[in-house]
Amino acid sequence: MAKAVMLDIPVQGTGHPRDVVKSWDDDSAAIFNGYFDNTQGIKEKECYRFVEENMSKLDVTVKGCLGSTMWINYFPHVSREALRSGHFDKVPEINGTKNTYYSGSLFNFETVFHTMSVSQWIVEEYF
């Protein structure tokens, strides 16, 4: 049976891919994730070039790009004042409004642990 595969690749620096995710081990398509400081002026084409360079070191040929997305604000950023006034304590109060519940990584950092913790809390709190 096919299964998801995630490969850690050696970190080469800002803008270079950090990991590779394939939905199925027998699939030829993969997702590359990388992080960089947007103030350094790295452009999308340069990130693609970094993917090609890194994969060639692993004897993998990149045949093309099906799509790409660059996020400027990957997760919610709030001011110090908003933190002091309890922003993240107030945010969950919108859950249940119009029978809508917000889970996943919307209100926290996107790790499996944090995402699962918030989702479990919502189920325990509201259902």
Image: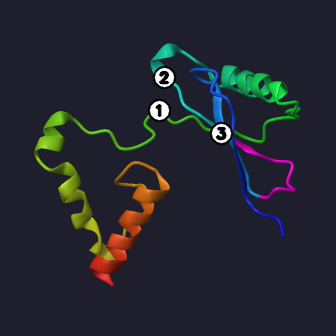
Q: Name the amino acid type tagged 3.
A: Asp
Question: Which residue was labeled with disc 1?
Answer: 72
Confirm or deny contact between disc 3 and disc 1 (CB under 8 A). no
Q: Tell me where residue 65 sits by quadrant.
A: top right
The answer to whether residue 122 is left or right of residue 91 is right
* Residue 102 at least partly seen: no
Above or below: residue 93 compared with residue 45: below
Q: Are marks 1 and 2 in contact (CB under 8 Å)?
A: yes
Seen in the picture, residue 101 relative to 18 is either above or below; the reply is below
Relative horizontal placement of residue 40, taking residue 44 as reference (left or right)? left
The quadrant of the picture occupied by the N terminus is bottom right
Residue 118 visible somewhere in the drawing: yes
- Mark 1 crowdedness (10 Å alpha carbons): few <14, some 14-19, many ≥20: few
Q: According to the image, label 2 marks what residue?
A: 38
- Crowd class of label 3 (few under 14; some 14 to 19; many from 20; radius 10 Å): some
Vertical comparison of 1 with 57: above or below: below
At 48% from the left and 22% from the top, the residue drawn is: 38
- The picture places residue 117, in percent across and down from the top left corner, at 38, 64
| N-term-proximal mark, 3 vs 1 | 3
Q: Amino acid at mark 2?
A: Asn
Q: Could you tell me residue 28's position as x and y percent? A: 86, 48
Whether residue 30 is in magenta: the answer is: yes
Q: Which residues are magenta?
A: 24-32
- SS at circle 2: helix
User: Mark 1: which amino acid?
Assistant: Ile
| Residue drawn at point x = 65 percent, y = 39 percent | 19
Please name whichever residue, 78 or 35, is drawn nearer the observer in this view of the structure.
35
Q: Secondary structure at mark 1?
A: loop
Residue 108's place in the image compared with 124, above or below, is above
Work out how far the residue at label 3 is from the one at label 1, CA to CA, in angstroms: 19 Å
Task: Identify the residue under disc 3.
Answer: 19
Q: How is the image coloured?
A: rainbow
